[in-house]
Image (tube, helix red, strand yellow):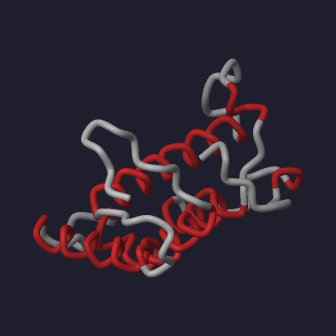
Amino acid sequence: MAQVSGERAPAFTSEELEKLVDVVLPQYTLLYGPPDKQVSAHQKKDIWRAISKEVRTLGVHHRRSTHCRKRWEDIHRWSKKMVEAQLGMASQRGRGARRTITPLMFRILAVAYPELDGRLRASQQPQGGEYSHI
């Protein structure tokens, strides 16, 4: 069914999130790495088009490149907030301080923030794959 203008796209399923992370992580340096490792804006658009094509292979929803990029940025930002709360770098008043870091978040953090490797408490090691809050 075609999406009506102004209507929200359906939430990404856990399978779509897994696929998104699987496809983005190998491209992370090209998209977000140091300036000398990044590619041009045009090449980034091509990468995001390829990423959305991979996510669409699941056949769940038609995800455009802009949807995939936005969802990745949301997951990335949420993962960073979670680890900051866990490590006491952020205010403990927020909800994030009570949440656990999911296996998906650990994968993102390992690539995006390798300097944090080993700093998370053992009690926060991955327990299961819950995606409803990211």
Q: Farthest right residue?
A: 123
- Nearer-the-camera pick, 29 or 65: 65
**Is 91 displayed left or right of 17 in the figure?**
right
Location of residue 62 in the rendering, given as x and y in whole percent from the top left corner: 37, 66
**Is 89 displayed left or right of 50 in the figure?**
right
Tally of marks? 0
Q: Farthest top residue?
A: 93
Q: Please name the residue shown 64% across and 42% down the image.
A: 82
Write down the quadrant of residue 45 in the picture: bottom left
Q: Please name the residue shown 62% across and 56% down the image.
A: 116
Location of residue 96 in the rendering, given as x and y in whole percent from the top left corner: 68, 33
Q: Please name the residue shown 49% across and 62% down the image.
A: 112
Please, is residue 7 above or below residue 59 in the view?
above
Please, is residue 127 above or below residue 79 in the view?
below
Please identify the quadrant where the N terminus is shown.
Answer: bottom left
Q: Please name the residue shown 28% across and 36% down the image.
A: 6
- Nearer-the-camera pick, 15 or 124: 15
- Nearer-the-camera pick, 95 or 65: 65
Please, is residue 121 above or below residue 6 in the view?
below
Location of residue 53 in the rendering, given as x and y in whole percent from the top left corner: 34, 77
**Is 49 displayed left or right of 22 in the figure?**
left
Q: Farthest front residue?
A: 1
**Is 56 displayed left or right of 127 in the figure?**
left
Location of residue 56 in the rendering, given as x and y in whole percent from the top left corner: 41, 74
